[in-house]
Amino acid sequence: MVLFCLVGISLSAQIKGVVKDSASGKPLPYVSVWVENESIGITSEEDGTFEINTTEKSKKLIFSALGFKKKKVDVGQTGVVLLSQTAFQLEEVVIQNRKETKRIEIGQTRSGIMEAFENGARIDVKFFPYSMSYKKTRFIKKVSIITDSQIEAASFKIHFYSVDTSGFPGGELLDRDFIVKVSKGNTRTIFDVTKFHLSIPKNGLFVGFEKLMIEKNKIDKTFTNKDTKVTTTQKIYAPMVLYNWVARDFIFTFSAGKWNKLTKSEGQRDKMMVNEPAINLILTN
């Protein structure tokens, strides 16, 4: 395994605030806060507070939380940010008896190359296309993910997205955040998702992870410039998720408050090589 750390650039303006439920007035934890059109983001703490740096005071912040309406706010008006709950429209779930006599794991790759990145404020997803071979094991029982963490019980969100009409990640398939924790070190962790009654749609689905950029996950790393000998301290957030080096036609990343699609160059015959999060699904009947 090769470990990469991408060091961010120190920014000037620090913005502080708190996110609350507009109906109850209670603080909202784990809200994603993004600087519009910039790859800068943070997560609100358990008490709803947040601190974020931005290059300009004229920027807007985007606040996003599952079950609440997305909101854009001018940087100068973020002292108290109120989010309104939204009526979450999920497809009707028909709960069926599961035999669980069969089990298959999907998502394995042939690539032996795995890398860990300090990916910063973004959501990386892996696409799982549907196959007729899943017809008898259509229920999603577990999701596995490989991480490398320098701290114990580092936490993050796992997302399940439908596929929209343009092929992009669409609506969330859960009505609440699925927050998980992983052990210290390099580990493969398997999470049971039976309670969500998920099945793999016939047009596939995206599964991704979002790092919680909160104090409990923060690590101060010291870096020394080899040329100038100047030592600086940068913040990174655990855990790092490992990535497979694989050939794909496309890959999606959510940053700067929107989905971004990377595709192979025009005229390129072969698939492009990309870093794809090491996420697998375990299906059952």
Image (cartoon, rainbow, N blue to C red):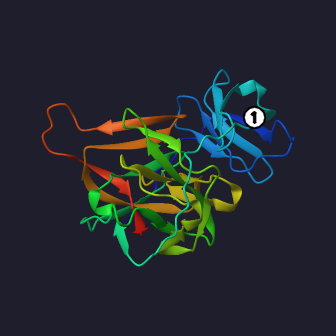
- The residue drawn where x is 65% and y is 51% is 176
Residue furthest bottom as drawn: 101
**271 or 36: which is nearer to us?**
271
Q: Amino acid at mark 1?
A: Ser
**133 or 6: which is nearer to us?**
133
Quarter containing the N terminus: bottom left
Residue 82 in the image: above or below residue 42: above
Residue 102, located in which quarter of the rendered image? bottom left
Q: Is residue 213 left or right of residue 248?
A: right
Residue 58 in the image: above or below residue 179: above
Q: Where is residue 232 shown, x and y percent of the image?
A: 57, 52
Residue furthest right as drawn: 25
Few, some or many residues within 10 Å of mark 1 (<14, 14–19, 20+): some
Q: Is residue 63 left or right of residue 194?
A: right
Quarter containing the C terminus: bottom left
Task: Name the residue tied to disc 1.
Answer: 84
Residue 271 in the image: above or below residue 263: below
Q: Where is residue 212 shown, x and y percent of the image?
A: 62, 54
Q: For numbered disc 1, what is the local secondary structure?
A: loop
Q: Is residue 120 left or right of residue 87?
A: left
Total numbered labels placed on residues in the image = 1
Residue 243, located in which quarter of the rendered image? bottom left
